Amino acid sequence: MSARPAASRRTVLKGAALTPVAGLGLSACGGGGDDRAAPLSGPVELGPESEVAEGGAKLYRDHNVVVSRSGDGTLKAYDTLCTHAGCPINKLDGTRLICPCHGSEFDVTTGKVLREPAVAPLKPLAVEVKNGTLVARPQA
């Protein structure tokens, strides 16, 4: 068996630079495909007003919207696309949204960032009740 000479560092780096990178087409969020979603572009019916308890929140994953209700009954809604890399946020823990991509966390009562890497707050949405149904839309 003949011994092969060890590859030089330069040879290894040149080869790495010429090798296609697997997953190059993936989004910044990582994962098996494009995890990005489009922001809300028009009004959308979310569900019965009764789904959001006083002092609580409800995540509407299908529409990338979260709605919270304060102790005085005031409703607030936010787009749930992470402001760090655009990933749809799919976890709500009380009134805290947790992004699955890089761990950013947001307060759903204010939209403010609780944990980086995101630094910009969530985008606020208009929310109203029409015939007992929550309706969210982009703010004018």
Image: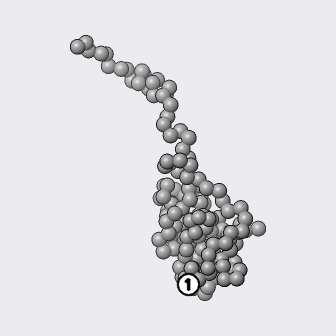
Please state which of residues 118 and 44 is positioned toward the viewer in this rendering: 44
- Residue 13 screen position, x and y as percent: 44, 26
Q: Is residue 52 above or below residue 62?
A: below
Q: Which of the 4 image quadrants contains residue 15? A: top left
User: How many residues crowd around disc 1 within 10 Å: few (fewer than 14), some, or many (20 or more)?
Assistant: some
Which residue is farthest bottom?
Answer: 72
Q: Which residue is mark 1?
A: 54
Q: Is residue 70 visible?
A: no
Q: Residue at x 37, y 20 (%)?
A: 8
Q: Residue at x 50, y 40 (%)?
A: 23
- Residue 7 screen position, x and y as percent: 36, 20
Q: Which of the 4 image quadrants contains residue 81? A: bottom right
- Residue 105 screen position, x and y as percent: 51, 64
Please state which of residues 112 and 60 is positioned toward the viewer in this rendering: 60
The image shows a total of numbered marks equal to 1
Q: Residue at x 76, y 68 (%)?
A: 140
Give the color scheme: rainbow, by chain, secondary structure or one colour. Answer: one colour
Q: Quadrant of the N terminus?
A: top left
Q: Residue at x 72, y 68 (%)?
A: 43
Residue type for callout 1: Glu
Q: Is residue 73 above or below residue 119?
A: below
Query: In this rendering, would 55 be left or right of 8?
Result: right
- Residue 12 screen position, x and y as percent: 41, 24
Q: Secondary structure at mark 1?
A: loop
Q: Is residue 15 visible?
A: yes
Query: In this rendering, would 39 be left or right of 3?
Result: right
Which residue is farthest top?
Answer: 2
Please state which of residues 106 and 138 is positioned toward the viewer in this rendering: 138
Which residue is farthest left?
Answer: 1
